[in-house]
Image (tube, rainbow, N blue to C red):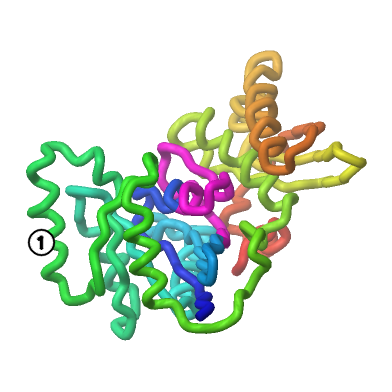
Amino acid sequence: MMRCGTVALVGRPNVGKSTLLNHLIGQKLSITSRKPQTTRHRIRGILTREEIQYVFVDTPGYQVRHTSALNRAMNRSVMDTLQEVDVVLMVAEALHWGADDQRVLDRIPLSVRPLLVVNKSDRARPRHRLLPFLQERGQDPRFDAIIPVSAQHDRHFDSLLDEIAKRLPEGAFMYDADDITDSNERFLAAEFIREQLFRLLGEELPYATTVLIDQYATEGALRRIHATIVVNNDNQKAIVIGQGGEKLKTIGTLARANIEGLVQGKVHLELWVKVKGGWADDERALKQMGYDL
């Protein structure tokens, strides 16, 4: 009996949704960093096991503090996803349940009973607090089940997948058994570049940046990519480029390595930096950049 369905990962920023997706699929698809709100787009990761196909949808962390056009678009993306999927995973961090987590739960339709995935359970300190925390969360009738996992160390994934499989509808697969995503290489290349902006720049600057792919050409086993990093002002441009161009070179080197891992081939990557003030509040510009408004 074949089962196939969509599974949304939702939660406040920085609880490990993207890391969870990548480890479930066994391939880096969704970018990660220690900074919250790294994910801006819905990304599908596909896992096929014998007669079951899971289509995971990684969503942006629900934004409750910022109100730019970009943030509003990301929040709409989360809400639209909740209306379309078969199973909802609410991802929370072990021993941490606060107002932001509750706000996300409150936005899940009452007709939906999500599975609560308690991530980073291996890091819970002191350890004796984990069981009471799980028991307390288990008293909330909104949750259909609670599964502690460690995305970083691939722990308890079988239990999680078993719980999801019970709730997937019977039906034919949506994708070929060896597919891992429906995102194209061009989109993922932009994401891998943006990941390095979050990892290598300061606390606030990455939120003022985005990435455009100007050219993506395949020449045999070589990918030739030209991309533009968009910032708000000249000061930000100078920081991204760095002294003597060193920062931009480092961003390109690390991004290229990740893209080569994805495409299993050589990549020639050229980066430029362009100023476009207020891009995150310009709906026309956001549409041109591929954001779903």
Q: Main secondary structure of the magenta part?
A: loop
Q: Would you identify the image quadrant in which residue 263 lies? A: top right
Q: Residue at x 71, y 36 (%)?
A: 260
Q: Is residue 179 left or right of residue 134?
A: right
What secondary structure is found at the residue carrying circle 1? helix
Examine the rendering and report whether any part of residue 107 can be seen: yes
* Residue at point 20%, 55% (across, down): 97
Query: Which x, y percent locates residue 164?
Result: 38, 69
Instruction: Name the outermost residue toward the top.
Output: 244
Disc 1 residue type (three-letter): Glu
Q: Is residue 197 above or below residue 89?
A: above
- Location of residue 271 with respect to 178 vertically, above or below: above
Rendered image quadrant of residue 146: bottom left
Spot occupied by residue 223 in the image (x, y as percentages of width and height)? 83, 40
Stretch in magenta: 21-46
Q: Position of residue 15 (x, y in %)?
A: 34, 49
Question: Magenta segment: does it hold 23?
Answer: yes
Residue neighbourhood size for the residue with mark 1, other residues' Cα within 10 Å, grouped as few (<14), some (14–19), many (≥20): few
In screen coordinates, is 130 left or right of 241? left
Whether residue 183 sits left or right of residue 100 in the image: it is right
